Image (cartoon, rainbow, N blue to C red):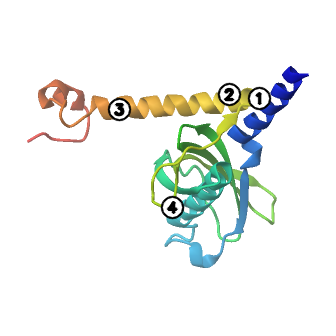
Amino acid sequence: MVEDVLEVEKIEVQNVLFKSKKDSEVVLCQLMLPNNSNFSGKIHGGFILSLMDQVAYACASKHSSKYCVTASINTVDFLNSIEVGNLVTLKASINYVGKSSMVVGIRIESENLQTGIVKHCNSSYFTMVALNEKGEKMGIPGLLLENKDDIRRFLESVKRIEMKSKKLTFLNETNFKRNNYENQLKGYNVKII
């Protein structure tokens, strides 16, 4: 009987300490208007980045129940242009959680409403950090990994974080020795003076 009560308490604690990615998924759809276009008549990349930042904030805040700020953006590749009049859908979900940070995966699709053709336009990863009223980092709930894709996305985020750390260490200003790397610049469109 006591064991049953303890088991129920564990489950209740776990529900508070861990959240499913479904608990914080955000989908934003917006019609692309002429005032959002650039000089070539396509939707301006800066406008899309602004929408991405908004959806990343909403997703991270839903997961953490805290105010969140953008710490970094990993890889913004514009794969296909977006036309005026298209319906753009941004899908955001939590891919990774640390102690106070989260990686929000964002997929952007553009739909031509006349033809029904949907194009994948971008996939990006925003690192968001939860803060309290004083601007200090706050602890966040863990992430329930419920299927193969959740596990894969989490591990991909771990690898991206490790690669970023290695890159920063590798080309660290204090450790960098010019003579060690000059040969690597051969074949590039540069001239060392």
Q: Is residue 35 left or right of residue 18?
A: left
Cα–Cα gap, marks 3 and 2: 24 Å
Three-letter amino acid code of the residue under disc 3: Lys
Q: Would you call the spot at circle 3 few (<14 residues within 10 Å), some (14-19), or many (20 or more)?
A: few
If you read the primary sequence from the N terminus, does the residue marked by circle 4 or circle 3 appear first? 4
Three-letter amino acid code of the residue under disc 1: Asn
Cα–Cα gap, marks 4 and 2: 33 Å
Residue at 54 percent across and 37 percent down: it is: 98
**Residue 57, horizontal then vertical, whole percent:** 59, 57
Q: Are marks 1 and 2 in contact (CB under 8 Å)?
A: yes
Q: Say the numbered circle drawn on residue 147.
A: 1
Three-letter amino acid code of the residue under disc 4: Glu
Cα–Cα gap, marks 3 and 1: 31 Å
Residue underneath mark 3? 167
**Quarter of the rendering containing residue 21:** top right
Label 3 sits on a secondary structure element that is helix
Q: Would you call the spot at circle 4 few (<14 residues within 10 Å), some (14-19), or many (20 or more)?
A: few
If you read the primary sequence from the N terminus, does the residue marked by circle 3 or circle 1 appear first? 1
Residue underneath mark 2? 151
Cα–Cα gap, marks 4 and 1: 35 Å
Residue underneath mark 4? 133
Q: Would you call the spot at circle 1 few (<14 residues within 10 Å), some (14-19), or many (20 or more)?
A: few
If you read the primary sequence from the N terminus, does the residue marked by circle 3 or circle 2 appear first? 2
Q: Are marks 4 and 2 in contact (CB under 8 Å)?
A: no
Three-letter amino acid code of the residue under disc 2: Ile
Pick out the residue farthest to the front.
2
Label 1 sits on a secondary structure element that is loop
Cα–Cα gap, marks 4 and 3: 33 Å
